[in-house]
Image (cartoon, helix red, strand yellow):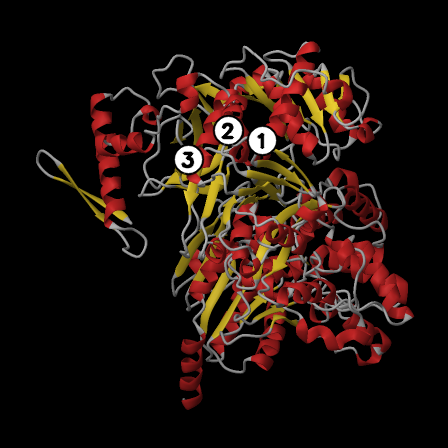
């Protein structure tokens, strides 16, 4: 989209040009109005801060206001009654109807009211009155419902405590809430931590409680008083108690009863744990409408066959489930006439489509701080992403920018909630309450507030709200900022992925990586057996390989899929295939219970193959030590398991120490599995002859791209670039002689170029050639282009990647050995973004071996190399470094008649040369094209931006093939 502004004599005319595949006319019309509103405000208030100026025009402002016009007067408001009094009214209407069922037990509305009244009177004798908190820690049972109603009828507020919580967490909640009374069951008393509350056992103490009056107690509770306090997870590591009033609870019950059409014939399943606010809606929508509330044991509520059996047996009509729990059920096996409400996490379009056929399907949204639910959407069988609907009655929502200004329709902002459902705040946390509950700038009502949800949302054109994710859901890995939700969203689009969660694991400390957990998409009758086949297939060893054709999805498939849409650093390094995601008691995904990939074997690309002889066993031990991964299979790929160039040096050093065979680094690049390396070690005489040419990515139909080594001599630095360019781009590296310790390094650029040209022509005898190089590699590529031109060959691309033309400063003969070693250490650290500071002064008084030892010590101090790396490998690398540096400064450049492309890092080394063309301008007789890449000299070679530029510079396969045919005809 572009905006063209045309200046006339007394006016400005603007024209929006836009892609109709991305924008519709209504959206552009709103943008025009927003822009005009901003310009008018600028003229009227030229001194005002831009962030304080409105964007919304009058029409859009009125539209947003109409969407928030939710004010209604409920029966609760008119009569100033609370939720338990609404229940009492229902008792009068249907006293003999069944109110609550638990297994083979049940209570009618009259019986439930009687027991709750007796408990309420008993609690009042213990001093319970408005604003007094009463703890309740019971298992699912009839006593649970009696306890909740009894507390509310006594005028108190209940605090649910889950007996399954760790003692430390329960202890904190009891200490923080300071409940004077605790309702529980006898079998749970010994499991509770130390506390000061008066304990009432609803089972063994009932004989005493039942002596109290069974009449509705008289109380002075008001809608503004507390109804319950629920603890939610806190960013500080301690849970925080949310203070919810009767007004919010009553409004919720009336709205949900009407919206979900709950009536006396309805049967509502109580699925959520009492410690989570979804239980509030389940309990009171049933009991305040005359419906039956069905309780069940935790085992019966496990998502899967048990839950489906329960819903069929009890003929459930209404159920609220998290999408992750619903997704393990089969729509075709659900009870007829079932109304489904999903809440608690984002719902996928696929799940909504499956479950909205022939049944009512609602997507509800709301944090605990807005009394369970703030918006509701009824979803139909459409394929677009489900939205979260509109605000419920007496709730207002605002989507604001960081300056608390309303954002235009379609623009993301933070969702803020106000109105009747707003919680009072956080228990004993005035600071957090003030931070999260702010004054409502859009209300004239005294004391009106808004809750800052931290959720990123936007208005759709029809007034519905789309949930986009969390504002704070970010991680950083190796300096990259990553939104985990983006990876999950892309992975969810894979047709064989039903559910997925991506997390960042840090095992061991300092080694953070992305891990994706995937539940495969299995339908119908395949669900029970297919999921188990998928989960266990990666654990099969060689003698069970016949099962591998049944593998429904593999990490290699997922990795290839993600690489189509995401940069390499956002592709998880491990994938774990599960039959279901672990769930917390509230039905949400329990991220902390996700298994570590290194112990589950489910992340492997192939079936796990353990070591089969002593040699393979020794290799797996070395790999485990270098990669810090366990266990390792003999078909695992070194680079897929987190290996990189410097770890490769460490690996080969340990292999040389263990086996006494000095294999070149290129061996690992071409044979990246233990199985392949073991074959070479067993038959060392059959190891491939050393060659400067390394096929980093040999496949693909595009013209091959040849990259020459930097000053260090290795081509491992190009692994990321080759991966970014993709599988269709053949990529060859040219490494320095001498890395193997057998050959003499070359010390003339001309000799290197001739040697490498000959190697290139074994792959591509004729032009046009595409060559390049990073740093020193660019200098060698320049000379190769000269020699190829001199022989009549065409060089279609000469890419100099942050390469400087040699200048006569600090020639090798003018540099001491200490200066060379200091530069060598800096280059060694720079390859992985580590600062390896080794000064000339430190090295000057030492002999060579001592100097190299000092570098090794510094490298190990910053975990750059493993301590096992010895002098021999480092001495080889330094020898090549020294020869290459000498060759560069001895080289005398001549003008080049062809075209050159210079790809510069944005962070320039001014001390080398202030010339933005790095000294190449005067030599480029055929022209010099320059591009700037964000980053520095060391990060540029790993840059995705560099890869995208090279993709545009390299011809596609069809053009290349046509040019090759023309050359053959000539």
The image position of residue 312, as x and y in percent, is 60, 53
Q: Residue at x 72, y 55 (%)?
A: 646
Residues at circles 1 and 2 in contact by the CB criterion of under 8 Å: yes
Query: Helix or strand or loop: what does disc 1 sit on?
Result: helix
**Residue 389 placement, left or right of 432:** left
The image position of residue 489, as x and y in percent, is 52, 52
Q: Residue furthest left?
A: 9
Q: Is residue 97 above or below residue 754?
A: above
Q: Nearer the viewer, residue 697 or 933?
A: 697
User: Which residue is labeled 2 in the image?
Assistant: 90
Q: Determine crowd level at label 2: few under 14, some 14-19, many 20+ residues with C-alpha closer than 10 A.
A: some
Residues at circles 3 and 2 in contact by the CB criterion of under 8 Å: no
Marker disc for residue 109: 1
Q: Residue at x 44, y 16 (%)?
A: 80
For the C terminus, the image quarter is bottom left
Mark closer to the observer (1, 3): 1
């Amino acid at each position: 989209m572009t905006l063209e502004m045309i200046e006339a004599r007394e006016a400005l005319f603007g024209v929006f040009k836009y892609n109709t595949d991305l924008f519709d006319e209504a959206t552009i019309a709103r943008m025009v109005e927003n822009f005009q509103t901003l310009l008018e405000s600028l003229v009227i208030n030229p001194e005002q801060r831009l962030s304080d100026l409105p964007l919304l025009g009058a029409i859009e402002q009125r539209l947003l206001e109409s969407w928030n016009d939710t004010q209604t007067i409920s029966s609760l408001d008119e009569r100033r009654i609370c939720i338990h009094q609404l229940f009492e009214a229902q008792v009068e209407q249907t006293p003999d109807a069944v109110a609550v069922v638990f297994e083979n037990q049940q209570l009618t509305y009259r019986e439930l009211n009687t027991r709750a009244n007796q408990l309420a009177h008993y609690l009042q004798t213990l001093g319970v009155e408005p604003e007094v908190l009463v703890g309740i820690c019971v298992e699912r049972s009839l006593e649970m419902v009696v306890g909740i109603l009894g507390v509310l009828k006594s005028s108190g507020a209940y605090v649910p405590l889950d007996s399954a919580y760790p003692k430390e967490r329960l202890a904190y909640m009891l200490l923080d809430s300071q409940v004077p009374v605790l309702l529980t069951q006898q079998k749970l008393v010994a499991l509770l931590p130390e506390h000061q509350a008066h304990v009432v056992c609803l089972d063994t103490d009932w004989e005493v409680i039942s002596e109290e009056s069974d009449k509705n107690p008289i109380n002075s509770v008001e809608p503004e008083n507390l109804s319950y306090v629920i603890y939610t997870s806190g960013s500080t590591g301690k849970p925080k108690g949310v203070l919810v009033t009767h007004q919010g609870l009553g409004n919720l019950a009336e709205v949900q009863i009407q919206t979900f059409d709950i009536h006396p014939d309805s049967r509502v399943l109580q699925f959520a744990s009492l410690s989570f606010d979804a239980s509030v809606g389940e309990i009171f929508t049933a009991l305040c409408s005359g419906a039956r509330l069905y309780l069940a044991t935790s085992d019966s509520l496990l998502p899967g066959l048990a839950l489906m059996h329960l819903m069929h047996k009890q003929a459930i009509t209404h159920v609220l489930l998290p999408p992750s729990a619903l997704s393990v059920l089969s729509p075709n096996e659900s009870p007829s006439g079932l109304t489904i409400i999903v809440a608690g996490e984002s719902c996928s379009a696929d799940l909504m489509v499956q479950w909205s056929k022939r049944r009512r399907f609602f997507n509800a949204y709301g944090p605990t701080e807005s009394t369970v639910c703030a918006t509701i959407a009824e979803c139909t069988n459409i394929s677009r992403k489900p939205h979260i609907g509109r605000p419920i009655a007496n709730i207002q929502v605002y989507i604001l920018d960081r300056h608390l200004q309303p954002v235009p329709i379609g623009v993301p902002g933070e969702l803020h909630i106000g109105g009747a459902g707003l919680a009072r705040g956080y228990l004993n946390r005035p600071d957090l309450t003030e931070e999260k509950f702010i004054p409502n700038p859009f209300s004239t009502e005294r004391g009106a507030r808004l809750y800052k949800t931290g959720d990123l949302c936007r208005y759709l054109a029809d007034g519905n709200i789309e949930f986009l994710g969390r504002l704070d859901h970010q991680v950083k890995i190796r300096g990259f900022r990553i939104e985990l939700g983006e990876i999950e969203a892309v992975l969810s689009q894979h047709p064989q992925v039903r559910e997925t969660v991506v997390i960042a694991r840090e095992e061991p400390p300092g080694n953070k990586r992305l891990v994706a957990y995937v539940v495969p998409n299995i339908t119908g009758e395949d669900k029970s057996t297919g999921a188990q086949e998928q989960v266990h297939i990666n654990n099969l060893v060689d003698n069970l390989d016949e099962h591998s054709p049944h593998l429904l999805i593999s990490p290699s498939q997922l990795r290839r899929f993600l690489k189509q849409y995401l940069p390499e650093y956002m592709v998880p390094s491990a994938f774990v295939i599960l039959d279901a995601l672990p769930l917390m008691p509230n039905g949400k995904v329990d991220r902390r219970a996700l298994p570590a990939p290194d112990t589950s074997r489910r992340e492997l690309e192939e079936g796990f193959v353990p070591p089969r002889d002593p040699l393979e066993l020794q290799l797996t031990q070395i790999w485990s030590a270098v990669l810090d991964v366990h266990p390792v299979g003999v078909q695992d790929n070194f680079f897929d398991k987190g290996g990189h160039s410097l770890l490769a040096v460490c690996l080969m050093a340990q292999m040389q120490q263990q086996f006494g065979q000095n294999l070149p680094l290129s061996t690992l690049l071409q044979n990246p599995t233990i199985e392949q390396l073991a074959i070479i070690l067993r038959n060392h005489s059959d190891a491939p002859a050393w060659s400067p040419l390394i096929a980093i990515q040999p496949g693909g139909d595009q013209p091959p791209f040849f990259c020459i080594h930097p000053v260090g001599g290795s081509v491992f630095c190009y692994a990321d670039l080759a991966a970014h360019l993709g599988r269709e781009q053949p990529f060859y590296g040219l490494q320095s002689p001498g890395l193997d310790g057998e050959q003499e390094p070359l010390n003339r650029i001309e000799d290197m170029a001739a040697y490498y040209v000959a190697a290139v022509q074994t792959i591509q005898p004729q032009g046009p050639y595409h060559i390049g190089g990073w740093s020193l590699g660019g200098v060698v590529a320049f000379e190769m282009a000269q020699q190829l031109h001199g022989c009549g060959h065409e060089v279609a691309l000469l890419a100099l990647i942050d390469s400087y033309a040699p200048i006569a400063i600090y020639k090798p003969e003018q540099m001491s050995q200490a200066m060379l070693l200091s530069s060598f250490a800096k280059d060694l650290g720079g390859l992985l973004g580590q600062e390896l500071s080794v000064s000339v002064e430190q090295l000057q008084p030492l002999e060579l071996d001592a100097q190299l030892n000092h570098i090794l010590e510094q490298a190990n101090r910053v975990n750059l190399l493993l301590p096992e790396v010895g002098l021999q490998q480092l001495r080889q690398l330094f020898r090549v470094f020294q020869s290459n540096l000498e060759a560069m400064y001895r080289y005398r450049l001549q003008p080049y008649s062809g075209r050159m492309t210079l790809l510069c890092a944005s962070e320039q080394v001014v001390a080398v040369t202030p010339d933005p063309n790095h000294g190449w301008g005067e030599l480029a007789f055929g022209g010099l094209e320059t591009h700037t890449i964000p980053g520095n000299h060391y990060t540029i070679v790993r840059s995705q931006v560099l890869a995208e530029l090279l993709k545009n510079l390299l011809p596609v396969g069809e053009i290349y093939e046509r040019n090759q045919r023309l050359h053959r005809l000539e």
